[in-house]
Image (cartoon, grey):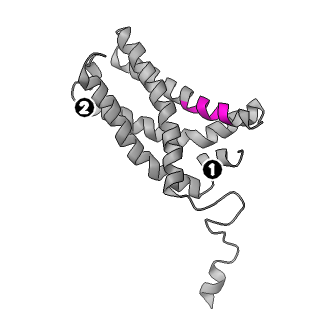
Amino acid sequence: MVHSTHHTGHHGPHDGPHTAAASWPMAVKATLHCLTGCAVGEILGMVIGTALMWGNVPTMALAIALAFVFGYSFTLFGVRRSGLDLRAAIRVALAADTVSIAVMELVDNGIIALVPGAMDAHLSDGLFWSALLGGFGVAFLITTPVNKWMIGRGKGHAVVHAHH
């Protein structure tokens, strides 16, 4: 009897209008969306910093900043097309992408920093591109379950889907 009242008032993960079971294909799609923005921004930042012969720290800072800019922008443009005003669209983009981009950038840049010689490689070096692309691959594998978990709780890209 005691256990029957234990859950009174408790809402499960599928209660509420905006939460639904997150499928792996949905999580993969959200992660690919995030990866696209991150990759564009990060590659652009790495190319600019390397071409200008900046040090590792400013190059990585630029790459990370541009990854967030492009990651948020892709979502922002999509939700603006659905009719949201700019302020609401920014809130949706921040809610949808912040954790996903942060996890992706942490993993990707961590791998680049840990691969011996990758930070000092030039644009013409295979090591530069293999570390960068390998980092994206590992980041995708780690970020996908994070996105699945968030979507299943009505967060992350589930916020975007509420506006489409």
Which three-letter amino acid code belongs to the residue tagged 1? Answer: Ala
Circle 2: element type? loop
Question: Which residue has dot 1 on it?
Answer: 158
In the image, 124: left or right of 106?
Answer: left
What x and y, as percent, mark residue 9? 70, 73
Rendering coords of residue 127 (x, y %): 24, 25
The range drawn in magenta is 71-78
Q: Which residue is mark 2?
A: 115
Label 2 to label 1, Cα distance in Å? 34 Å
Secondary structure predominantly adopted by residues drawn in magenta = helix
Q: Is residue 73 magenta?
A: yes
What type is the residue that disc 2 sits on? Val
- Quadrant of the snapshot with the N terminus: bottom right
Residue depth check, mark 2 versus mark 1: number of the one nearer the observer: 1
Q: Residue visible at 21% across and 29% down?
A: 116
105, 44: nearer the viewer? 44
- Residue 144 percent coordinates (x, y): 45, 49
Q: Return the disc, 2 or 1, that comes first in the chain's sequence.
A: 2
Q: Position of residue 39 (x, y in %)?
A: 45, 30
State the count of labels. 2
Answer few, some or many: residues within 10 Å of disc 1's Cα (few below 14, many 20 plus, some between 14 and 19).
many
Looking at the picture, tell me which residue is in the foreground, 7 or 131. 131
Query: Looking at the image, can residue 131 be seen?
Result: yes
At x 70%, y 49%, the residue is: 162
**Callout 2 crowding tier (Cα within 10 Å): few <14, some 14–19, many ≥20:** some
Q: Is residue 45 left or right of residue 10?
A: left
In terms of secondary structure, where does tag 1 sit? helix
Using the rendered image of the protein, determine whether residue 64 is visible from the camera's viewpoint. no
